[in-house]
Image: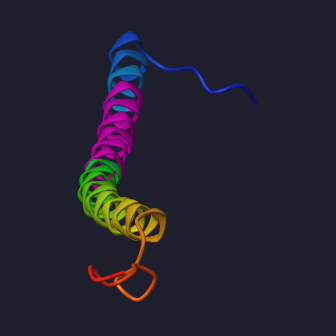
Amino acid sequence: MIEQHTPNESAANQFADLQQQFLTMQESLMHVQHDQQQMHEVLLAQQEEIGRLNASLAKVNGNMERLLNAEESPSPEDEKPPHY
């Protein structure tokens, strides 16, 4: 037996279906916004870490340059005393 709906029942069912779809879309949007916020926070933390790493790398490079320049110049032990 086929159920027959009156036009009002059919419209009410369609409205209920649309409400449910709307609620489902709102929930999905909330999850997407939450995920986007988490990714934003991770990105900011990574940018801060990259900044710290770049500063450390610059410091290490500066130390290496000083050491390399120190090796190129004669050490005081290798220099002859002034009276020779």
- In the orientation shown, which residue stands out farthest toward the top? 7
Q: Nearer the viewer, residue 54 or 73?
A: 73
The image quarter in which residue 7 lies: top left
Residue occupying image coordinates x 32% and y 23%? 15
Q: Residue 56: x and y, percent?
A: 31, 66
In this picture, residue 48 sits left or right of residue 43? left
Residue occupying image coordinates x 41% and y 89%? 77
| 76 magenta-colored | no
Q: Residue 12: x and y, percent?
A: 33, 24
Query: Is residue 44 depicted above or below 84 in this figure?
Result: above
Q: Residue 19: x and y, percent?
A: 31, 31
The magenta stretch is 17-38
- In the orientation shown, which residue stands out farthest toward the bottom? 77
| 33 magenta-colored | yes
Residue occupying image coordinates x 76% and y 30%? 1
Query: Is residue 26 depicted above or below 65 in this figure?
Result: above
